[in-house]
């Protein structure tokens, strides 16, 4: 959806169409940060999660001013419409590329959502390769009896 909106923006249509394309691009791209955080939470081990999020934030904060500078230079040399078309083509190319990259196709987990037929599958069906699991405490047996308190102390009559 955002690809269609960005492609429409790249063509610099009349203002009403431009606004509609901007809304379409925004609605399509809106869920991406939340999706990214869910994927990081599920797939990145806790020990390195801070580094991954720090790198993502650094790249995001750097990309906006650098890309604005580069786009300004290209607009100055090639023209506004040509730059818009080039950026729209680049956006569409990246979107299509993400559809064919094997790592991106595997973000949903195992095929079919059920248990994997390989020996690397664990009890909830996720293949052990590439899908980190949260650490759990070892099973230490039954829970200890609660300490006596006001509700468990027999009353003297």
Image (cartoon, grey):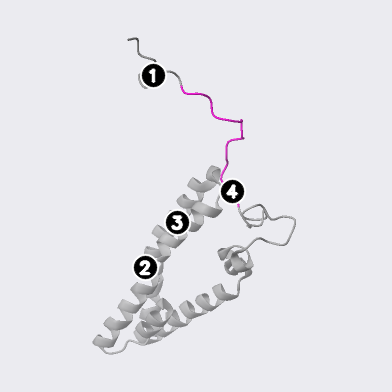
Which mark's residue is nearer the viewer, 3 or 1?
A: 1
In the picture of the structure, the residue carrying the numbered disc 2 is 30
Local SS, label 1: loop
> Going by the picture, which residue comes out furthest to the top?
156
**Residue 125 sits in quarter:** bottom right
Indicate which disc residue 133 carries.
4
Q: Nearer the viewer, residue 19 or 55?
A: 19
In the picture of the structure, the residue carrying the numbered disc 1 is 149
10 Å crowding of disc 4: few (<14), some (14-19), many (20+): few
> Going by the picture, which residue comes out furthest to the right?
119
CA gap, disc 2 and disc 4:
28 Å
Q: Is residue 130 left or right of residue 12?
A: right
10 Å crowding of disc 2: few (<14), some (14-19), many (20+): few
* Earlier residue among tags 2 and 3: 2
**Residue occupying the point 40% across, 76% down:** 2
Q: Is residue 116 left or right of residue 85?
A: right
Which mark's residue is nearer the viewer, 4 or 1?
A: 1
Magenta stretch bounds: 132-146
In the picture of the structure, the residue carrying the numbered disc 3 is 37
140 part of magenta stretch: yes
Local SS, label 4: loop
CA gap, disc 3 and disc 1:
43 Å
Indicate which disc residue 157 carries.
none
Local SS, label 2: loop
Rendered view: 103 above or below 130 = below
> Going by the picture, which residue comes out furthest to the front?
157
> Going by the picture, which residue comes out furthest to the bottom?
14
Q: Is residue 77 visible?
A: no
137 part of magenta stretch: yes
Which mark's residue is nearer the viewer, 3 or 4?
A: 4
10 Å crowding of disc 1: few (<14), some (14-19), many (20+): few
Determine contact: label 2, label 3, CB under 8 Å. no
């Amino acid at each position: 959806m955002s690809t269609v909106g960005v492609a429409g923006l790249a063509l610099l249509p009349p203002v009403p169409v431009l606004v509609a394309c901007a809304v379409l691009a925004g609605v399509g791209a809106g869920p991406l940060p939340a999706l990214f955080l869910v994927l990081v939470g599920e797939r990145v081990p806790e020990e390195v999660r801070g580094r991954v999020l720090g790198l993502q934030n650094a790249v995001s904060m750097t990309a906006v001013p650098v890309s604005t500078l580069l786009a300004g230079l290209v607009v100055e040399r090639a023209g506004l419409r040509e730059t818009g078309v080039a950026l729209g083509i680049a956006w569409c190319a990246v979107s299509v590329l993400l559809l064919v990259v094997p790592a991106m196709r595997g973000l949903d987990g195992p095929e079919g959502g059920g248990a994997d037929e390989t020996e690397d599958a664990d009890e909830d069906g996720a293949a052990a390769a590439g899908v980190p699991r949260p650490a759990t405490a070892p099973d230490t047996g039954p829970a200890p009896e609660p300490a006596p308190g006001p509700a468990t102390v027999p009353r003297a009559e």
